[in-house]
Image: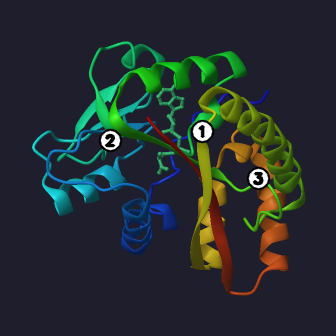
Amino acid sequence: MKKSRKLRNWDNKTWLSSKSYISEFNKFLKTKINLNKNSKILDVGCGRANIISALQKKYKFKNNPVGIDVIANKNVKKNIVFKKIDALKYLKKKRKYDLILIKQTIHFFTKTKSNNLLNLAKKRLNPKGKILIFSLKTKNNKIPCFKKMRKNLEKSLKRDENLFKIIKKNLKKISYTNFNFKVNISKQKYVRMIRERYISCLLNMSDKEINLGISEIKLKYKNHIKFTDTLKCISYRK
Ligand SMILES: C[S@@+](CC[C@H](N)C(=O)[O-])C[C@H]1O[C@@H](n2cnc3c(N)ncnc32)[C@H](O)[C@@H]1O
């Protein structure tokens, strides 16, 4: 029987937790929003909170950024305020933010729940505040995959396209850009990431399927795997 697993290894020693990724990502954020020490930030589905922690180091915000997640990972960063709570519950609290970051998290929400999430997020914005939603690009995605993983990924990217329609309908005045990060990773490290089920499309696979997939990856790729990890950024300004 397949176990129901949660996503725990997303940002655990992967390129997504590397200094260069966080630094490139935060440079990209700077092109989207002007932050200063008075800015108030909420990260929805923050994982280990690497991003807002790096922002806090740089800007020394008067109010530490808030990171929320339904999973409390052991090594969540300490210089932020972490709350283990469902986003829909947290957003009912009447606090306001200048930036609400929803990075690679909205695909966890059903159609109704993502509409609820967006409606609440809009209400929680200060004037001129921004919601920035990041999600895997859906067309020609370069994430290295084995066959079954690709099939699952394509299925979830199809769902994401519908989600983008829901977001557009809900937020209306939005703009789109891409965040590109050039990944250069050893095959050994990538295999470990797959074994640890670093991405949602691996969560429901059996150990046997994962092992077969790893054999496929070992045959298919050279010792170093290079590709561009592209995220679509949807930006909404109040
Ligand atoms: C793919 S990870 C992204 C982590 C981080 N934002 C990043 O980009 O590195 C998605 C995160 O969303 C969290 N999550 C899923 N549903 C959630 C919900 N309803 N409320 C809060 N967090 C949620 C998961 O636990 C997971 O840590």
Label 2 sits on residue: 74
Could one spot residue 130 in this view of the protein?
yes
Q: Label for residue 75?
A: none
Residue furthest bottom in the image: 223
Identify the mark nearer the N-term, 3 or 2. Answer: 2
Distance between mark 3 and mark 1 Cα atoms: 41 Å
Q: Are marks 1 and 2 in contact (CB under 8 Å)?
A: no
Mark 1: secondary structure: loop
Neighbour tally class for label 2: few under 14, some 14-19, many 20 plus, Cα within 10 Å:
few
Q: Amino acid at mark 3?
A: Ile
Distance between mark 3 and mark 2 Cα atoms: 25 Å
119 left or right, relative to 138: left
Between 103 and 226, which is closer to the camera in this rendering? Answer: 103
Identify the mark nearer the N-term, 3 or 1. Answer: 1
- From the top left corner, tell me how far across and down residue 94 is, in percent: 29, 15
Q: Quarter holding the C terminus?
A: top left
- How many numbered dots are placed on residues in this image? 3
Q: Which quadrant would residue 69 be assigned to in this image?
A: top left
Q: Quarter holding the N terminus?
A: top right
Neighbour tally class for label 3: few under 14, some 14-19, many 20 plus, Cα within 10 Å:
many
Q: Amino acid at mark 1?
A: Lys
Q: Residue at x 36, y 38 (%)?
A: 129
Could one spot residue 198 in this view of the protein?
no
Label 1 sits on residue: 173
Label 3 sits on residue: 210
Instruction: Kindly report which numbered mark, 3 or 2, lies closer to the viewer in this rendering.
Output: 2
